Image (cartoon, rainbow, N blue to C red):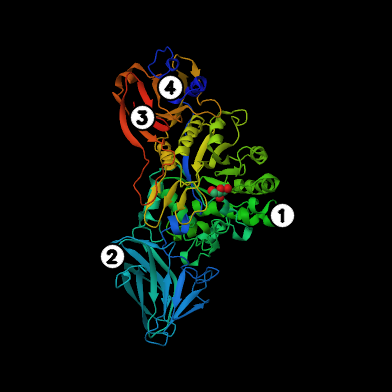
Amino acid sequence: MNPKHILMFCGIGILQCFNAPMFHLSTASAADQVITVNAKKPGAVIQPTMYGIFFEDINYAADGGLYGELLINRSFEFPNPYTGWDISGKVSLQDDGPFERNPHYVRLAPSGHRDKHTMIENHGFFGIGVKGGEEYRLSLWARVPDGGSSKLWIDLVDNATMDEDQKLGNAGVEISGKEWKKYSVVIKPRRTFAKAHLRVWGDSKVTTDVEHISLFPVNTYKGHENGMRADVAKALEDLHPGVFRFPGGCIVEGTDLATRYQWKNTVGPVENRPLNENRWHYTFTQRYFPNYFQSYGLGFFEYFQLSEEIGAEPLPVLNVGMACQFQNGDDAHAACTKEGLQQFIDDCIDLIDFANGDPATNKWAKLRAEMGHPAPFNLKFLGIGNEQWEKPYFDRLAIIAPEVRKAHPEIKIIGTSGPNAEDDHFFNGWKAMRELKADLVDEHYYRDIQWYKKSMNRYSDRKFYTKDGPRVFAGEWACHDRGKKYNHAGASIYEAAFMTNIERNADLVHMATYAPLFSHVEGWQWRPDLIWYDNLSTARTASYYVQQLYSLNPGTNVLPTTISIAGGQPAANPVPEGEDGLFASAVIDQKKGEIIVKVINTLGNALSAQINITGLSKKQLAALPATAEVTSLNCADYDAENQPGRPEVISPVTTSVPLTAGSILATIPAKTFALYKVKL
Ligand code: AHR
């Protein structure tokens, strides 16, 4: 019987029930429940990839988010070439620029009148966020088509100010000669402003051509010029992710094949990467973002580099020769013919060479070296196909996967079981992935609390998830609930509880990545999300802290863990289907010499639990410290959510608890994730 049963049996209010003598069964323990962790025989190895991150350019995750570029439509390649720009004076669009895949640029000619100014003004992504006193690098390509020299003025402005002068900071750039050259200048705004614009003024006497106008903070993550926004990337680094999946999600597939994500368009000089539409600009008419495109400035080189810098294994997912089946059904026009699959096979093999090959012998590896990374990126995993299903997918994977294996047997191939976690597509997908000998299968479940309550045993079902065969990659998942907020603390507690099941079954589950990862408060299409930001600040959600507690404390091996209720009767771990209760899992970190016990109370009332660590030698017991560390994330305020620019309302708190002969008498407050760490 677990406390929920007792509540049901009492049929009275929680407080009354907990005062009822029946709850305090005659017991050897002073606690409601006893958690026993057996440290004698460490079990399954926890893969270093276990707790990771899933990146997709949804919710302005790349341009306008993680990617440090502050200007929208920097190359005038949007379908409307002036999207994001206001123009005045004598501005004309030209199309014979220096970058063949982005041929447009603007010609700024003298207006012909002293008081008319030729000017272009960029709005950024929901404005340009700048911080007072920090440095911003403006760069552009320019020439003076008639020869000689000209001067451009660059102003960062606050259009809404009551000040006499709208300028927050400015700089001048001397342009010379008929040849295209890159110019750059640093601007230091005098105050912080989330909604700045950037103006480029033409010379009043000389015509100047301008292309690829770009503005980055000088202080990007790790200081790369084509770098990531520092606070956003730091939020990833602080997760210590084991694996980094990119670039999606549905954008891998595209609404049609022409608009699928094509990694080869995302590498090489940033000025020459062609624009692609972003399917999330039009997918939901109630959240429509017509200015949402992919500049590919954040491309596959940058993804690999970021993976390396945050310490995660890179996990690219490539297209299997099919556009999105949600948007097209099994329409044959949305898929490549089987005969035409060679380019998709090449994309896979060339990508592995781009990541790992020898620059002396391989052209893609040579490109990687030219981009600044001669050493390999050490790619080990490749996903082929996002949420695809049934025969059209299985047939194509059956052609692509063997070719990839032949060329690169060292790479683990990840297939998909489709968008759902329990329907026919899912079961057929698993069957096919077994037959095709996929190394891992990508499962997705964006589900509500009721589903999570019923699924706390998902990976203990070893009739379906057999000992051999593909391992599980829980590639997109999150607990959704009512109210549709940025994120729900009240739902996050079920994510924490569900993850005990992932952890206990580490022999089967090798990777798990919450999704989606990012969201701009003014540009979201999908929520909840793990990390939110506005133009100046970042918020880490309750779900983020759940992930972080796991990813910072993964351990090296699972320890068998049982829960019994006071009095010694065994209780299920986890509790029976569909119920709230106490959930636990434990690991040992053999390198650090510590045991970590994760305990989650999803009930609306506190529980006491005696945590007994058994199986320690006498010597180990004698050497234990007098206290254990406990870190608690309390999710009792159901609607609590951290928002950018506001003080955090929910975050983990670390204290210590007495540890006596390997036992901890713990009180776990309502809706709390408590993580106990015992140093050996
Ligand atoms: O994460 C949002 C979307 O959910 C992903 O693009 C897709 O894979 C899933 O349907």
Q: Is residue 377 visible?
A: no
Task: Work out whether residue 12 or residue 281 is closer to the camera in this orientation and state it.
Answer: 12
* Residue with the mark numbered 2: 190
Quarter of the C terminus within the rendering: top left
Crowding near pointer 4: few (<14 within 10 Å), some, many (20+)? few
Please tell me whether mark 2 or mark 3 is closer to you in this view: 2
Please tell me whether mark 1 or mark 2 is closer to you in this view: 2
Q: CA distance from mark 1 to mark 2?
A: 57 Å
Marks 1 & 2, CB-CB < 8 Å contact: no
Q: CA distance from mark 1 to mark 4?
A: 63 Å
Q: Earlier in the sequence, mark 4 or mark 2?
A: 4
Q: Is residue 79 left or right of residue 597?
A: right
Kind of residue at disc 2: Arg
* Residue with the mark numbered 3: 677
Q: Position of residue 466 (x, y in %)?
A: 60, 30
Q: Earlier in the sequence, mark 1 or mark 2?
A: 2
Kind of residue at disc 3: Lys
* Residue with the mark numbered 1: 332
Task: Work out whether residue 27 or residue 161 is closer to the camera in this orientation and state it.
Answer: 161
Q: Is residue 280 above or below residue 52?
A: below
Marks 2 & 3, CB-CB < 8 Å contact: no
* Residue with the mark numbered 4: 16
Q: Earlier in the sequence, mark 1 or mark 4?
A: 4
The residue at 37%/82% (across/down) is 149
Q: Position of residue 504 (x, y in %)?
A: 49, 29
Mark 2 residue's CB less than 8 Å from ligand 1: no
Q: Which element is circle 4 on?
A: helix
Kind of residue at disc 1: Ala
Mark 3 residue's CB less than 8 Å from ligand 1: no
Q: Is residue 599 left or right of residue 263?
A: left
Please tell me whether mark 3 or mark 4 is closer to you in this view: 4
The label number, if any, that marks residue 437 in the structure image:
none
